[in-house]
């Protein structure tokens, strides 16, 4: 692993805390209508994953004052993927 352990820890905490916020607040009932998506759950899952990866990449740039290497980028994605079961289970509820 090339990511700084503290950065990886904070990113993992961000993922868990943000998913908990989503679980408490739910989703707008207009999501399917506004975004014209056939599967609201898949749309929200993809949105969440993109949000987490994007937030972590932005945080990496701020903390390290540089772009992540390809390996670091992949490790950030893997941090999100470690929570794929919980993420998929939650967003599957939206159909």
Image (cartoon, rainbow, N blue to C red):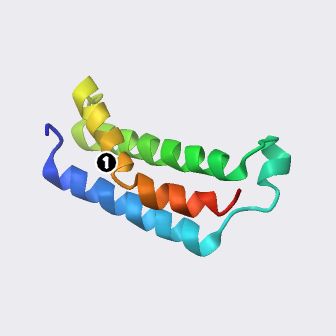
79 relative position to 84: left or right? left
Q: Residues within 10 Å of mark 1 (few under 14, many from 20)?
A: some
Task: Please tell me which residue is depicted at 82% across the width and 56% down the height of the picture.
Answer: 30
Q: Residue reaching furthest top?
A: 70
- Work out which quarter of the rendered image holds the N terminus and state it: top left
Quarter of the picture containing the C terminus is bottom right
Evaluate whether residue 35 shows in this view. Answer: yes
Q: Quadrant of residue 24?
A: bottom right
* Residue 69 in view: no
91 or 15, nearer to the observer: 91
Residue 79 picture location, percent across and down:
31, 48
Question: Is 44 left or right of 9, judged from the image as shown?
Answer: right
Instruction: Give the total number of marks visible in the rendering.
Output: 1
> Residue 62 or 73: which is nearer the viewer?
73
Rendered image quadrant of residue 73? top left
Q: Residue at x 80, y 62 (%)?
A: 29
What element does badge 1 sit on?
Answer: helix
Determine whether 20 is above or below 77 in the image. below
x then y, percent, for residue 93? 65, 63
Point out the residue furthest to the right here. Answer: 33
Find the residue positioned furthest to the bottom. 24
The image position of residue 83, as x and y in percent, is 38, 55
Quick check: 33 left or right of 63? right
In the displayed structure image, the side of residue 4 where residue 22 appears, left or right: right
Estimate the x, y position of residue 90 in percent, counting from the top left. 55, 63
The residue shown at (37%, 46%) is: 81
Give the labeled residue for mark 1. Answer: 79
Establish if 68 lies above or below 17. above
Front residue of 29/56: it is 29
User: Which residue is located at x 27 percent, y 24 percent?
Assistant: 70
């Amino acid at each position: 692993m090339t990511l700084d352990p503290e950065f990886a820890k904070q990113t993992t905490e961000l993922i868990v805390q943000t998913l908990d916020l989503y679980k408490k607040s739910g989703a707008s009932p207009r999501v399917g209508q506004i975004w014209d998506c056939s599967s609201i759950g898949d749309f929200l899952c993809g949105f969440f994953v993109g949000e987490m990866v994007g937030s972590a990449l932005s945080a990496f740039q701020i903390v390290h004052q540089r772009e992540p290497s390809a390996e670091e980028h992949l490790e950030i994605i893997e941090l999100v993927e470690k929570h794929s079961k919980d993420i998929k289970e939650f967003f599957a509820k939206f159909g």
